Structure formats: C-alpha cells, structure tokens
Image (cartoon, rainbow, N blue to C red):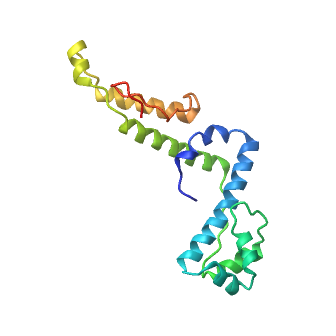
Amino acid sequence: MRPFSSSDVGVVEKMKDTSYRKNFFRKFTEDEIASQIRALIERRKHRQIDFARLAGMKPSVVSRLLQPEYSGWRLKTLLRFAEVLDARLRIVFEPAEDVIREYEQFEIELLKQRFSSAPKPQIEDDEQVTGRTIPSEFLQSHLKQMEDDLRSGRLPKPRWGSIVTSHGEGN
C-alpha cells in the first residue's frame, strides 16, 4: 500500500458512501499497479524501452500499461512483468472496513502531529491572569476524546489551512 499523504485527509468520511468507496478503490488499485511496476523497473535499472524488449512487447504498449489510469490489466501480463522483473506477484483482497480503519489511524496521527506542532497557548500568562494551570491529564483526556469523536464521525473534519497563533497570525 502506498504511503498516506495529506491529500488523504477527509477520505474516511467520503468512504462511507459505497459508490465513492468503489471508485476510490478502483482508482487506487490502477495507480498502485502502475506505480509498483515503474518503481521496480527503476530499481532493476532498466530503461522502459529495455524492459519492453525483455517482456517481448512494443515500447508503446508498455508505456500505455504503465499509465496510472490504465485499467485493462490481465493476470497473464502481470505475471509476465513479474517474471521479467524477478518479482513475486501477490494479489491481496482487503476488506473495506480494514482500509477505512487504516485511513482513520492516519487522520488521527496527522491530527496529533498538527496538534503537537501548533503554537502552544501561553500558559504562563494564563497562570498570571487566573492563578490556574491546565493539568496535563486534562489535555491528554481531551486529545483522547477528540480521537474517539473523529473515529465515530462526531468531530467535524479539521480545516488545516489556517491555524491562528496566539499572536493572531495565520500559518
């Protein structure tokens, strides 16, 4: 599976729609197949034209097959590519709920990273004004509640574009 990226934020909510999920899985698979083959061709230090010759195909055919949007894969062709690249072909069926859980975990980790890198409130100033500090147990339980809310869909999708610092400047 490809690494997650920040463009994947918000996908969990969209995947609840079966039609969106089917299209997402199809496009992801098409892109993933081409991406893996291109990476392995590069790892084997082949040029695309050399790979085409080794596979017994015209370079124009190989070029078309390696396009991310290509969807006409045949098992026979994938097996031929695997043989030429000295690789094992493995096909894995992942239940939708497992994939969704992976994306949920990614969103939670991204939320934690952004939360921990966000400008910290000036607690010292707050202490001077109110005479109180915010206990770390409170912050931890609040973060845990946010994770639970995100998983259950009760938390609105975060808007990552503009974080306002304590000085009123946007990031």
| Residue 66 visible, this orientation | yes
From what the image shows, is residue 29 above or below residue 149?
Answer: below
Q: Position of residue 54 (x, y in %)?
A: 67, 86
Quadrant hosting residue 49 = bottom right
Q: In this orientation, which residue lies closer to the viewer: 68 or 23?
A: 68
**Tag count in the figure?**
0
Q: Position of residue 118 (x, y in %)?
A: 37, 35
Q: In this orientation, which residue lies closer to the viewer: 129 or 171?
A: 171
Which quadrant does the N terminus fall into? bottom right
Quadrant hosting residue 151 = top right
Identified at 52% across, 46% down, the residue is 6
Q: In this orientation, which residue lies closer to the viewer: 139 or 41?
A: 41
Q: In this orientation, which residue lies closer to the viewer: 115 or 49?
A: 49
From what the image shows, is residue 93 above or below residue 158?
Answer: below
Query: Would you say 13 lies left or right of 165 here?
Result: right
Identified at 46% across, 38% down, the residue is 111
Q: Position of residue 143 (x, y in %)?
A: 41, 32
| Residue 93 visible, this orientation | no
Q: Position of residue 62 (x, y in %)?
A: 72, 75
Extreme residue toward the top, this view: 130
Which quadrant does the C terminus fall into? top left
Query: Would you say 119 lies left or right of 61 here?
Result: left
Identified at 23% across, 13% down, the residue is 129
Extreme residue toward the front, this view: 169
Query: Would you say 152 lies left or right of 75 here?
Result: left
Identified at 36% across, 32% down, the residue is 140
